[in-house]
Structure formats: structure tokens, C-alpha cells
Amino acid sequence: MKDRNKILFVCNSTWGIYKFRINLIRQLIAAGLEVYVLAPRDRYSEALHNEAGLIYLPLTTLRPTSFSLLGDLKLYRELLGHYRRLQPDLIFHYTIKPNIYGSLAARRAGCLSVAVITGLGYTFLNNGWMRKLVTRMYRFALARIKEVWFLNHDDLQTFVQEHIINSSQSFLLPGEGVDEKFFKPSRHYEIRPVIRFLLIGRIIREKGIAEYVEAAASLKQQGYQVECLVAGFYDHDNPASIPHRQFFDWIRSGVITYLGASDDVRPFLNQADCVVLPSYSEGLPLTLLEAGCLSLPLIATDVPGCREIISHGVNGFLCLPRNASELADAMSNFYNLSPAERMTMGRAARTTVLKRFTQLKVHAIYFNRISGMLGRKLEYPARLPQFKQGS
């Protein structure tokens, strides 16, 4: 047996690794594993490159938002080359292209791998040719893989019902975890004359930003004293990005206030009375978990991922997706709660997160599953420095 097992994390962005999994990786390194990250270069690449004990290898052929048979063949060959050279004991693949081409390359190289379905993405939102193609590619790539992990029940059932995988391959992971010490409520509930709603997410259509803007305009026209905030980075390379002119027209009109983007979202969250996520589909939205951990009530669409977190009327409200009128009703329902009712709802949101979705629980699951796959007991580090949440 090797003294140090080698694990690879493969994703379509270094941002995705840093935001969701950097603390897990630090713990794996502290437990004595050799950890590599393979992802295209972006603004978080330097942070990964400078991370102690972590080896970052840039992927030069991965184009997350474009489809090209030639380009994807190059990606497959690039991954296969890395896998044959490194001979890892285990590979974790995240997002669509790594899940498909990485799983195929791992099979060819004789490497054990896990596909983590972090969400179905915009290709599954419609029943067009792209969904049919991706379904067939998933079915072929995951046919012989031992484990496929999902972040919510709905996505798992979709893969089983569409015969992409067998139910025996599936495993449900409760998200990527929230650091409950980092996201700890630090203020008393404030009674404000203006209720502040906040949407945090990439500035893309699938986050429901257009519906949020329409709902905000409706509430203001009805005389509600509300401020509707938006925070998140503009995803220039995503075909689903809101057009620049349209987004900044919304800002100039005063219907929304744009706070910008930050690696630490707590200052944004601490400005809000309620967090809103009118997304069309999610894996398990970290935004809602972080907000809930700070005892903020939640409003989201009744879609996969969001309904895993929100109990309607208990820790927040659910509404129909792609429906600004329904969203406005949910926001007005929150507005009309008493301060005591809002505070009770926020406390219920934190209770939900602490019960199911903390990093401690999720990372313990990772360690247990990895131990089983490696055939050795992987000791969960008893004491580690307090790491900053990757967000």
C-alpha cells in the first residue's frame, strides 16, 4: 500500500473548487493525502496554486459553455494523458464535461472515479436536442462507474428514471457543506422601515433575475417599502448571461440595487432581511444555506435543490418558477409577517442548516466514502486551523 494516496478533483472552473471544496481539500491534505486539482485557469487559479500542499494543473482544452466534437475530443485526450501519468487512486469529477469526458478517460486509464452531479444545468431545462444528446452521453459515460453522487433527490430520480444510471450506483450527498462558525449570526434582529430582499448569484437568466426585477417593480408600484438588492459576479462567458445593457438599465431605474461581487458574502447577507433565489433549477444552493445559517428567512422557487432546504411557511416560502407574480406574492407574504414571525422563521432556517448541511457533516461523509473506496481508514483531522469559508 502507498504511504500517500493520490486524489484528483476535476471541475470546469477553479472558482467551483475554491468556493465549494477548498476546506475539504485542506482537510484531506492534513490527513496525509496527495491532492491535485485539474481545472481551466480563471481568477481563482492563483489562489489554488498558492494553497499549501495542493498541486494545481490547468486544463487548456476545457470550454464549459461551448460544444464542439473536436474540442471535446481534445479534452478527453488531455484528461487521459493526466490520468495515465499521475495514476491517481481516486478521481472526483464535477460539472457536465468532467463528468462525461473525465469518467470516460478514467475508465480508459483504469482509474477509480466518482461523478458528482452538482445540478442538471440549463441543458436539462428544455427538452430539445441538447438535452437528448447530453442524456445519451451521460448514459454511455456513467455506465460502468461505481458511484454517482447527487446533491438532491430530484436529480437522482431523473437519472434513474431516464435510465442514465442504476439506482445501485447512486448516492445522495447533502451539498458541499457550510461552516456554521464562519456563518454565525452576529446581530440582533432589526426592525427597519424598509424591508431588504437580497438575491445572490451569477448574473444569468437561470437564476431568475428577470422575475426578481419584475416582482420588485410590482411591490414598489403597490406601495411596499422594500429595497431589492442583487449581489454576484457577471459571468461574461456564459451564454445565459443577462445582457449588459438590460442589467444596468434595471440598476439605473432604481428597481434593484447592485452590490457587486465578493469572496465573502457575509456583509451582503447582513444587510438583508430575507434572501431570495428564484432559480429555474439548482443542485443544492449554497446561497440559501449560507443565508439560513445566518438565521435569515428564505424565499425560493419550488424546484430541485431549493425544495431540499425550504419548508414552506416554516423557514421560508416556496413559489412557482418563472412566475414573477408568484414571487411577488411570496415576498409580500414575508413583508406582512410581524418582526417576531420573521425572527422565528430565520431561526428555523438556521436549525435546518445545522441539522443537515454543515461542513462537519458533509466532510465526514466524504472521509467515510473515500476510506471505503481506498480500502483504508482515513482519519478525519481532529484539530485544524479555522479556515475561511471558500465563498
Image (spheres, rainbow, N blue to C red):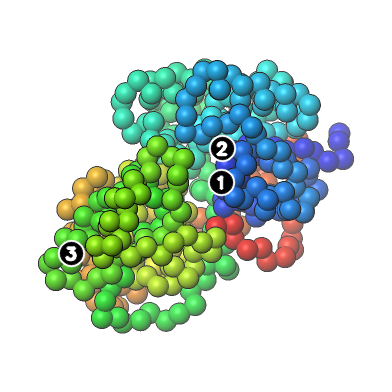
Locate residue 129, reporting x and y percent: 35, 20
What numbered label is drawn on residue 255?
none
Nearer-the-camera pick, 380 or 208: 208
Q: Assign the N terminus to one quadrant of the image.
A: top right
- Residue reaching furthest to the left: 222
Nearer-the-camera pick, 362 or 245: 245
Q: Label 2, secondary structure: give it.
A: loop
Residue at 42% from the left image edge and 35% from the top image edge:
120
Q: Label 3, secondary structure: give it.
A: helix
103 w.r.t. 380: above or below: above
Locate residue 300, reporting x and y percent: 32, 54
Task: Identify the residue position indicated by label 1 in the image.
Answer: 16
> Which is more N-terminal, label 3 or label 2?
2
Residue at 39% from the left image edge and 68% from the top image edge:
296
> Which is more N-terminal, label 3 or label 1?
1
Q: Amino acid at mark 1?
A: Gly
Residue at 45% from the left image edge and 80% from the top image edge:
187
State the separation of the CA atoms marked 1 and 3. Answer: 34 Å
Task: Identify the residue position indicated by label 3 in the image.
Answer: 219
Nearer-the-camera pick, 311 or 267: 267
Characterize the local packing of mark 1: few (<14), some (14-19) or many (20 or more) Cα atoms within 10 angstroms: some
In the figure, is residue 76 to the left or right of 381? Answer: left
Q: Label 1, secondary structure: give it.
A: helix
Residue at 59% from the left image edge and 57% from the top image edge:
390
- Residue reaching furthest to the front: 245
Locate residue 83, reporting x and y percent: 72, 27
326 w.r.t. 34: above or below: below
State the separation of the CA atoms marked 2 and 3. Answer: 38 Å
Task: Identify the residue position indicated by label 2 in the image.
Answer: 12
